[in-house]
Image: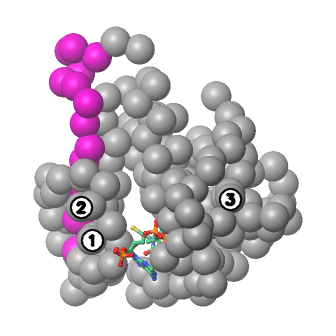
Amino acid sequence: MRDVKQYTLPAASPIIEIKALQNGNEAETCARMMAGSEPWITLRRDYNASLKLLADPSREVYLALVGGRIAGFLILTLHGAFAGYIQSVCVAPDWRGQGIGSQLIAFAEERIFHEMPNVFICVSSFNHGAQKLYERLGYEVVGELKNYVVWGHSEILLRKTIAPLAEFKR
Ligand SMILES: CC(C)(COP(=O)(O)OP(=O)(O)OC[C@H]1O[C@@H](n2cnc3c(N)ncnc32)[C@H](O)[C@@H]1OP(=O)(O)O)[C@@H](O)C(=O)NCCC(=O)NCCS
């Protein structure tokens, strides 16, 4: 399912539209945003690696638009091990701290919980700001993947759940 959704954010937050990524220009904009930002600089996900991920048809990519311009994006994996995985969430530096990331994650949860009872996300051990955000949004630490992407840093696996697998009904 590729969806389009309109969110009204709290007062003082911009109004964003969330829509599926549609073309190569949008993917290039997102790849530049990702490759130029932590944590991906430290994790060595450069422009080409970012673009490859954004173009991977096994992923779902959604954009947060403010006034028609890309202010952030989300990459989801809905198949395979840890189905319901938020692979990446990124907000453009000028738009951070204004509720866009929270709304992208709320959108991801709505999308994933429609089909499965768990949302997973990894956060780098050095990414304290994102860790704080995910804790506030109700995510729990379920494990630590040491030296998972680069030596010297862990990826912390987080989970938010609405039901055990055996109980879940779509
Ligand atoms: C993490 C991120 C997606 C959150 O989106 P956002 O729109 O800034 O977040 P919101 O405005 O909804 O929530 C703000 C919270 O995010 C967290 N945060 C993390 N990095 C932040 C940043 N650079 N600027 C502002 N808030 C940040 C803080 O906990 C903040 O809470 P506070 O306002 O109480 O301090 C965004 O800051 C970002 O793209 N950061 C760089 C990439 C990244 O770390 N992605 C996550 C990888 S797991």
User: 117 or 32: which is nearer to us?
Assistant: 117
Per the model, the C-alpha gap separating discs 1 and 2 is 5 Å
Q: Earlier in the sequence, mark 3 or mark 1?
A: 3
Q: Is mark 1 within 8 Å of ligand 1?
A: yes
Instruction: Name the residue: 33% across, 67% down.
Output: 133
**Quadrant holding the N terminus:** top right
Are the residues at dot 1 and dot 2 in contact (C-beta closer than 8 Å)?
A: yes
Q: Which disc number belongs to residue 132?
A: 1
Left or right: 99, with 170 as reference point: right
Q: Quadrant of residue 65?
A: bottom right
Left or right: 148, with 47 as reference point: left
Magenta-drawn stretch contains 163: yes
Are the residues at dot 2 and dot 3 in contact (C-beta closer than 8 Å)?
A: no
User: 142 or 44: which is nearer to us?
Assistant: 142
Instruction: Name the residue: 81% across, 49% down.
Output: 22
User: 93 or 14: which is nearer to us?
Assistant: 14
Residue receiving disc 3: 15
Helix, strand or loop at label 1? It is: helix
Segment tinted magenta in the rendering:
154-168
Per the model, the C-alpha gap separating discs 2 and 3 is 24 Å
Residue receiving disc 2: 135
Magenta-drawn stretch contains 76: no
Q: Residue at the front extreme?
A: 11
Helix, strand or loop at label 2? It is: helix
- The percent coordinates of residue 77 (x first, y second) are 49, 44
Category of crowding for the residue at label 1, using alpha-carbon neighbours closer than 10 angstroms: few (below 14), some (14–19), many (at least 20): few
Category of crowding for the residue at label 2, using alpha-carbon neighbours closer than 10 angstroms: few (below 14), some (14–19), many (at least 20): few
User: 90 or 46: which is nearer to us?
Assistant: 90
- Disc 3 vs disc 1: which is toward the camera? 3
Q: Is residue 9 above or below residue 120?
A: below
Q: Amino acid at mark 2?
A: Glu
Ligand 1 image position (quadrant):
bottom left
